[in-house]
Image: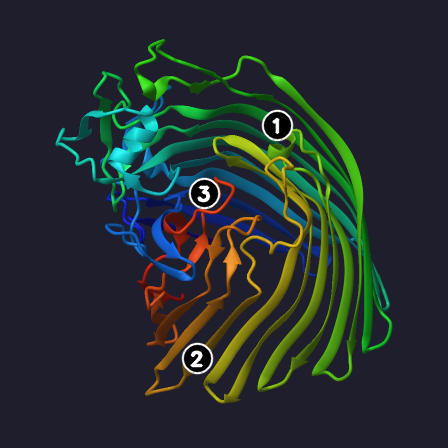
Amino acid sequence: MIGGFYRQGSGVRDPQFDAERGGQITANIRHDFGNDGTILLYARYLDDRGQWLLPIPIIQNGEDISEFPGFDANYGTLASNDGRFTTLNSGAQVDLAKGRGAEIVNVGANVEFALSDSLTIRDRMSFLGGNAFTTGLVPAGPPTTAANFAAARGGAGSRIGSLTFVNGGGAVSPNQQVIQAGIWTVEKKIDSFVNDLALQLSTGGNTLTGGVYYAEYFTRDDWNLANGLLLTAEDNARRINLTFADGRVATRDGFVQGSFYFLDAAYSGEDIALYLVDELQITPQLRIDGGLRWQKHSVDGYVRQPFYSNTDGNPTTLYNNNDAQRGPVQTPIAYSEDAWSFTGGANFDFTPDVGVFARYSKGKAFPQFDNLREGVTNIATVDTYEGGLKITKDWLNLYATLFHNDFSGLATIQIINGAPSSAVGGAKATGVEVEGALEPIEGLSLAFGATYLDATYQGFFTSNGAIDNTGNQVQRQPNWRWRVTPSYEVDIGGLRPSVYATLYYTGDRFSDPENNQLLPSYYQLDAGASVDISDRVRLQVTGTNLTNEIGLTEGNPRIIGSQGTGPILARPILGRSFTFGASISF
C-alpha cells in the first residue's frame, strides 16, 4: 500500500499568503505466512503546516455575539503580508507562513507468529523523529483606540509625537482601533522509540495476554513568546509605529516589546510497563474481562529559565527595555515514579440483538514535561464507572451509556500574563451518552448522538493556588451537546446519489476554570451530496457552517478573569465553506 496527500492554499481565514501547505506519504508492505502469522513493515513521512488559528476581536454582551467593526468573525485573521516577514528583537527572522506543523519520519514493524495452536507472540515497534513547530500571531488583549494605547504605554501625560504605518509611512489617526498581538515561536526537536511485546494464550473460552511495553523519547524545546506588534484591529492587519512627543520611541518596525518568555529546555523520558489481560467467555451470553498494568515513568533533563534586560541600554527605546534572554544556568530535572492501573468489565447478551455492559477502570497519568519544568509533579488519577445498553436491529442501532468519572491530581501549566501559571486539583463528571441510527425505509437513515454531562471541579486551584474553583463547571464542557444527521440514498438510472445534512448543538460553556468567560450555545448546520457515476468514480460536495454561525470555541486563555462586555477576544468556528471532491477506485 502507498498513499498520501498534498495541499496548498490560504485556508478559510485568508492571511494573504499560503497558510496551509504540505503533505504526507505513507507506505507499507505485508506478508502473510498463512496460519503461522504475518509481518507488516511501514514508513511515513509528514511535512505539513497550517495557520495557528487564535482568538480574534468580537463583540459580546452576555449571550449575544456579533462582529467587531472591520473584522469578519467568520473569515478574518490578523495575519497579513504586511506582518508576514519580521525580525524579532533577538535577531531571529520569522515567517508567519511557517504556521503550526511538523516534519517527521515514522517507521515501524508489526509482527505476529503462532508458536503453537494456542500460543501467539506479537511485537509492535516504531521509531519517530523530526521537528515540530508553532509560529503564530497571539493577541494580548481586546482592541482599543491608538490614543488609549499610547496613554497606557507611555504613562500619565504622554502625548503622541508620530503615529504612522510601518509600510508606506502614512499617518494613522489617534482614533484608529488597534490591537497588540505577539509573534510566538516554539521549536521542538523530537524523537521516540516504542516497542510492545506480548504473548497470548487461548484455551477454550479463555484468552490470556501478557506483555511488556518500553518507550524512550526526547525533546529539545526552544520557546520565544510575546514579541508584541502594534497592529490595526482589522482583517489582515497593518503594523504601526509610535513615537512620543518627548522623544521616546515606543516601537521598532511595529514591535512594542521583545520576548517575555525565552525558554531553552531538553527532556529525556523512559517508560517501562508490564501488563496482563484476561478475557473469559463464561457462557455464550456472558463475557468478562480484567486487566492490570504497572508502569514506571522516568524523566531527566534541564531547563534554562530566562533573565530580563535592556538590550541596548537606552531607556528611551521602550520596545526593548525588558527583553527576556536565554538563561545562563541549566537547572536539572529528575523524576522517577511508578503506578498501577487496572480495569474490569462484563458483557451480557440477552439475545443476539440486545445486550448490556458494565466496566470499572482506574487509570493513571504521569506529569508532562512542561509540568516538571515548573516543579508540578502530580500523578493524575481517574476512576471511571460506566454501564449501558446496546441494541442492533435491521432498522435500529443504539448505544446508551451512563458514566461517572472521578479525577484527582490534574495539573496543567499555562502562560498567563507573560508567566507560567499552574492549575492543579480534581473534578468529577456524571453523564449519559446516546448514539445510534434509524433506518425506517430503504435508503433513508437518521443518525443521532447526544450527551448530557454534569462536570464540575473539586478542589481545583488555578493562578498558582490562589483561586479555588470547586463547584465550577469544567472549562469548555457544555451540559448538552447533540447532533442529528438525516441522509437519503437512491438508485436513479444506474447512478446512486446521496444527500445528507447534519445539525449540531453545543450548549453554554465557560472558556476558563473560573467560569468568568462565557461561551454561549450555538448551532452549526452542515450538508453535502455525493453521486457514484460508475462503480469506480464518485463526485461529492460538502458545505460546512452553512448559516455562518459565530460559534465560540475559546475565549482568552492567556488571562484570568472576565473580559467584560463589548470588545473581547474569542475564537469562533470557521465560516461557511465548500469542499468539492472526486475519487477514483482502481
Secondary structure at numbered mark 2: strand
Q: CA distance from mark 1 to mark 2?
A: 50 Å
The residue type indicated by label 3 comes to Leu
The residue at the far top in this view is: 313
**Which image quarter: residue 493?**
bottom left
The mark that comes first in sequence, 2 or 3, is 3
Residue occupying the point 60% across, 33% down = 370
Residue occupying the point 41% across, 60% down = 551
Residue occupying the point 25% across, 35% down = 146
Please indicate whether residue 229 sits to the left or right of residue 330 in the image: left
The mark that comes first in sequence, 1 or 2, is 1
Residue occupying the point 51% across, 36% down = 416
Question: Can you tell which of label 2 and label 3 is closer to the viewer?
Answer: 2
Which mark is drawn over residue 46?
Answer: 3
Q: Position of residue 9 (x, y in %)?
A: 29, 49
Question: Can you tell which of label 1 and label 3 is closer to the viewer?
Answer: 1
Q: Position of residue 75 (x, y in %)?
A: 29, 54
Residue 117: tell me if it is visible: no
Provide the residue designation for mark 1. Answer: 267
Q: Position of residue 537 (x, y in %)?
A: 35, 71
Secondary structure at numbered mark 3: strand
Provide the residue designation for mark 2. Answer: 487
Secondary structure at numbered mark 1: strand
Q: CA distance from mark 2 to mark 3?
A: 35 Å
Between 373 and 177, the one lying in front of the other is 177
The residue type indicated by label 2 comes to Ser
